[in-house]
Amino acid sequence: MIEVKDLTKRYAGRTAVDAISFEVEKGEVVGFLGPNGAGKSTTIRMLTCFLSASEGTAKVGGYDIYDDSIKVRQHIGYMPENVPLYPDMRVSEYLNFRAKIKGLRYREAKRAVSEAMDICSLAEVERKMVATLSKGYKQRVGLADALVNKPDLLILDEPTNGLDPNQIRQARELIKRLGDRHTILISTHILSEVEVTCGRVIIIDRGKIKASDSPQNLIRRLRKPGEILLEMSGDAESAEKELLKLDGVNDVRRLDDRAKWTSFSITTDPNVDVREDVAALIQGEKWKIRELASRAASLEDAFVDLVQEKRGDTAEGKGKGK
Amino acid sequence: MRTFFIIFLKELRAFFLSPLAWTVMALFTFLNGWLFASMINAMQMRVSSRSLIYNFFDSGWFWMGFFILFPLITMRLFAEEKKMGTIEGLLTAPVRTSEVLLGKYFAAVVVFLVIVTPMYLFFPLFQAVTGEQAAFQGGALWGAGLGIALVGIFNVAIGTLASALTSNQLIAAMLTFVFAMLHYFLGFLHNFGVVPGSVWTGGMTYFSTTEHMHALTGGLIDSGPIIYYASFSILLLAITYHVLESRKWRV
């Protein structure tokens, strides 16, 4: 659906996007993840033909973004960052205008608008002015706008920016449902969002792609030590000593003593699960156990890892330059 | 072509559903009504060899009010969309930039024409009420209408360009006003120390809005001004098109 090759954008001596290449297959839901200013929006604006690339090419649905710009735009439903809308139009009017400008005829447009409003649950604000809507509704109007011409590809730039937690949850559910029917590219700097909604993540930092994989694989690739939480009652002193003796355990910290319950944080070697050994030990000693859980490494850890590694690189690079 | 009409209608709607167009129209009509009345008073006191229409459109007072129209009509065309960010949604839809540009431009032209129309009604109204047949010739009224429309399409094109240059509506308005005035004053250069009948005078007269209006309000329809304003409007719109497209490449 998207093929990007060596796409580059330079602004006055600064390279915002630096020769990135990636592909998105039909039906995928891909998260485009990076800190603010990493080049996500610039890349998206090049894909939607709002900006031209300095170098490189990209194709959307098989059409080149230079040669067939109109065709490319017919295939894309795009929701820009911060969802700009015309404040002085009613919701249905706005969507109708957008449907028509995207090439739908009068009757088709009418049907498409009511479908899009259904999907995004906009029925109750149909007659309201856009200016009076809450942020959450505005976001949904933007999404309905992106959906209205039934595009193959949805590109959503920071779709949950500025929403409250409840609205974020609803928006994510909606995006997840849309993933069944559309190929979706979501840009975001929020990690949990990608973990919840996306089948694949492309991590971009300072204009370069740092990684592209499923969230699970990215986490697996992390060589971070595992961490296990244990809450037990019994002889805490000797438990601490015994736990340290277990294979693969590197460190044991006592977190909390509450009445007779004590909780520990156990640090282990990477990719080693010592939970069974811990359980066996406690059973052997006839202590009681209330919680035994491994704290899974999250995408956040992978992200921080990748981005920090990169920061180290550039610091070195600068040093050499001098 | 379809896109053109969609944009055109949306812009017209935006103009006439906002109080701006109506306020401007009311004030402009009021101002010119006052001017019209004073003009008639003046002509009653002193015999004039010119017609009422000639004197009305020759008056500096008329042009002062007239040039304020353009910034008000055109400042929001692109500057507002840039400020709000809606330009991104607009131009990432499968539309041609030229259709968006022309849709907005012609909507502004129509708004301009609607705003100035009540002003023309003064003349037939005056004739009907007073029965003064000799105040002016019918052809002069049509000539004046054509002249105002020509100056209008040209200045709306200036305003469209100014609005595409900036995301600040006030700056767009200032640019429009200054350029419209500069062009207007350019037409007066031929009055200053140039030998009558020389090539220079002829050349300068070519730019002169007041000269064009003198001919047209006399009932003489000359193709010169028509071609002049039409070709410059096209040139300005072509520049605007490239300004809009330049966003893609600007660093």
Image (cartoon, coloured by chain):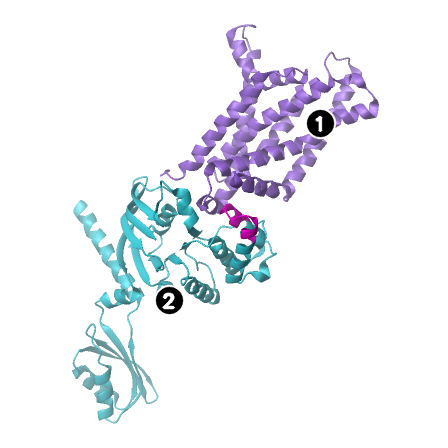
User: In this view of the protein, can residue B45 be seen by the observer?
Assistant: yes
Whether B83 is drawn above or below B175: the answer is below
Q: Secondary structure at mark 2?
A: helix
Spot the purple chain and give its letter. Answer: B
Coordinates of residue B34 in the picture (x, y in percent):
74, 28
x then y, percent, for residue B240:
47, 32
Q: Using the numbered discs, state the Cα–Cα distance from disc 1 to disc 2 in whole angstroms.
A: 66 Å
Q: Position of residue A100 (x, y in %)?
A: 53, 47
Spot the cyan chain and give its letter. Answer: A
- Classify the position of the C terminus of chain A by image quarter: top left
Q: Chain of mark 2?
A: A
Q: Which mark is residue B120?
A: 1
Judge left or right: residue B38 versus residue B183: right
Quarter of image, res B216: top right
Relative to the observer, which residue lies in front, B33 or B119? B119
Is B97 drawn above or below residue A206 in the view shown?
Answer: above
Q: Magenta-highlighted stretch: main secondary structure? A: helix
Count residues near mark 1 (Cα–Cα under 10 Å), then give few for <14, some for 14-19, many for 20+: some
Residue on which the image places disc 2 = A196
Q: Which quarter of the picture shows residue A53?
A: top left
For residue A138, side relative to residue B133 (left or right):
left
